[in-house]
């Protein structure tokens, strides 16, 4: 079993690791993963089935604030990365500070790009690029009623 911190890497380190992939199919996804819940774990397990190595790129705290508002993230980047790295389905976790992972996608050139079902295939950032080098873009259906935003709303309202 690999050590948790071996799964948390920089983009440069990840590029070096992937040079030695020997024909393995690389799957890439990204997100904020602020409050990890069943919808996330289901999604990541399904994404992992699309290849041999699953890379999860995670938005920095500043990026999450720009995308989700001042009160987010609830959990800091380091904690979010460690929780994702603890999942069996996840092989590597890398962070990015931009609002989209396009630059990482271009650098890593994954074979499969995966996003949740709330994204239309043609709207997935990096999709055109992945298809241009012969890769595939997939959308995985979401689990209804499972979202970090929903969990936060329940906590604020006191409802269970």
Image (cartoon, rainbow, N blue to C red):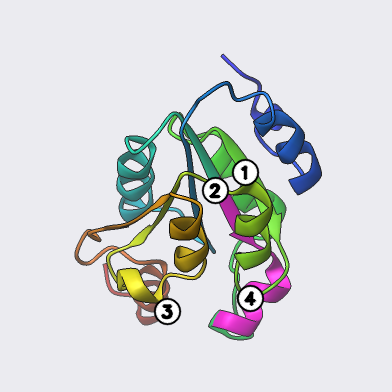
| Between 25 and 43, the one nearer to me in the picture | 25
Residue matched to label 3: 156
Would you say residue 150 is visible in this rendering?
Answer: no
Mark 4–mark 1 Cα distance, whole angstroms, equals 17 Å
Residue matched to label 1: 93
Mark 1–mark 3 Cα distance, whole angstroms, equals 30 Å
Please state the horizontal and vertical placement of residue 99, each as a whole percent of the image: 63, 75
- Residues at circles 4 and 2 in contact by the CB criterion of under 8 Å: no
**Magenta residue check for 52:** no
Mark sitting earlier along the chain (3/4): 4
**Magenta residue check for 61:** yes
Would you say residue 134 is visible in this rendering?
Answer: yes
Q: Report the quarter where the N terminus lies.
A: top right
**12 to the left or right of 66:** right
What range of the chain is rendered magenta? Answer: 56-67
Q: Residue at x 69, y 55 (%)?
A: 95
Mark sitting earlier along the chain (4/1): 1
Mark 3–mark 4 Cα distance, whole angstroms, equals 27 Å
The residue carrying pointer 3 sits among few (fewer than 14), some (14 to 19) or many (20 or more) residues within 10 Å by Cα, namely: few
- Residues at circles 2 and 1 in contact by the CB criterion of under 8 Å: yes
Residue matched to label 4: 99
The residue carrying pointer 1 sits among few (fewer than 14), some (14 to 19) or many (20 or more) residues within 10 Å by Cα, namely: many
């Amino acid at each position: 079993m690999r050590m948790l911190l071996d799964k948390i890497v920089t983009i440069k380190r990840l590029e070096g690791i992937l040079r030695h992939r020997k024909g393995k199919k690389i799957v890439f996804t990204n997100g904020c993963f602020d409050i990890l819940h069943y919808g996330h774990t289901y999604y990541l397990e399904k994404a992992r089935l699309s290849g041999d190595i699953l890379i999860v790129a995670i938005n920095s705290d500043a990026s999450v604030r720009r995308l989700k508002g001042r009160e987010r993230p609830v959990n800091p980047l380091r904690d979010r990365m460690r929780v994702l790295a603890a999942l069996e389905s996840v092989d590597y976790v890398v962070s990015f500070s931009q609002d989209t992972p396009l630059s990482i996608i271009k650098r890593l050139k994954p074979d499969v790009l995966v996003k949740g079902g709330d994204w239309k295939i043609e709207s997935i950032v990096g999709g055109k690029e992945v298809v241009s080098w012969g890769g595939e873009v997939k959308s995985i259906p979401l689990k209804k009623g499972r979202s970090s935003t929903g969990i936060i709303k329940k906590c604020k309202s006191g409802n269970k």
